[in-house]
Image: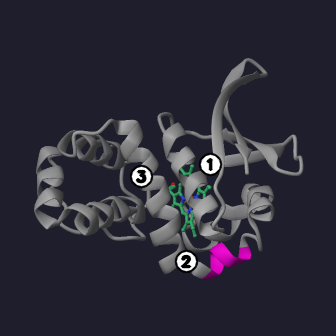
Amino acid sequence: MYGIVNKAIQELIETQYGINTWEKVRNNARIEDEIFLSNQVYDDTVTFTLATSAAMVLSISLESFLIALGEYWILETGQRHYNHYMIAGGANLKEFLINLPHFHTRIKLIYNELRPPEFEISDIKENSLRIHYFSTRTGLTQFVVGLLYGVGKMFNQEIKVMVESVEQDGNIHDVFLINW
Ligand code: HEM
């Protein structure tokens, strides 16, 4: 994944737990890079090893860390560094979620080797909808949950996220039922 994701892990830990904790996470993960370059592609194992190490050092589950990272990604990385993309994503929560399938098309213009997730929207009702999530990677379900909570907070709206699994054409994918 692009270094910006590893950078977000580093920033989250440094700002919320301090530089010493970050050093522990980095050493425990046996990562030698002292800085991550946003626009360089790193092997996915770097990101997964850092997340696993962070959960271990902070004595929380990997799932809890991924949720925290998802929220941080939206509220800090997204809003601070890419605010115009977040604004272009939609004027309110529902619109933003309905537009989600197109979100990374714009991001791909800056990060052209991006391997983004795919989203499909279904069952749109007044206060709920379903998001179908397809990825080339596994293990990121709770990251998506955190991202969705982050999007809710961005619009100052409390949301509920329920994870469901659905089989389609013999493959299983995650579905998120969002209520607000
Ligand atoms: C301006 C804000 C955003 C930027 C700059 C951004 C950028 C990225 C980048 C660089 C990656 C790593 C993929 C790679 O390097 O191949 C990524 C992955 C991902 N993004 Fe975004 N993204 C943004 C917003 C969002 C939003 C709003 C969502 C959904 C709510 C989202 C969902 C994901 C997911 C789930 C992944 C993991 C990849 C996978 O599932 O395979 N992102 N994004």
Residue 68: image tag: 3
> Which amino acid, by three-letter code, is at mark 3?
Ala
Question: Main SS of the magenta segment?
Answer: helix
Q: Is mark 2 within 8 Å of ligand 1?
A: yes
In this view, the residue farthest toward the bottom is 84
Residue underneath mark 2: 82
> Is residue 115 in sight in this rendering?
no
How many badges with numbers are in the image?
A: 3
Which quarter of the rendering shows the N terminus? bottom left
The stretch drawn in magenta includes residue 132: no
Of pointers 1 and 2, the one earlier in the residue sequence? 2
Of the pair 30 and 92, the residue shown nearer to us: 92
What's under tag 1, amino acid-wise? Answer: Pro
User: Which secondary structure lies at badge 3?
Assistant: helix
Checking the image for residue 117, the label placed there is 1
How busy is the neighbourhood of tag 2: few (under 14 within 10 Å), some, or many (20 plus)? few
Magenta range is 84-88
- For discs 3 and 1, the disc positioned in front in the rendered view: 3
Residue 87 in the magenta stretch? The answer is yes
For marks 1 and 2, give the CA distance.
18 Å
Q: Which structural element holds mark 2? A: loop
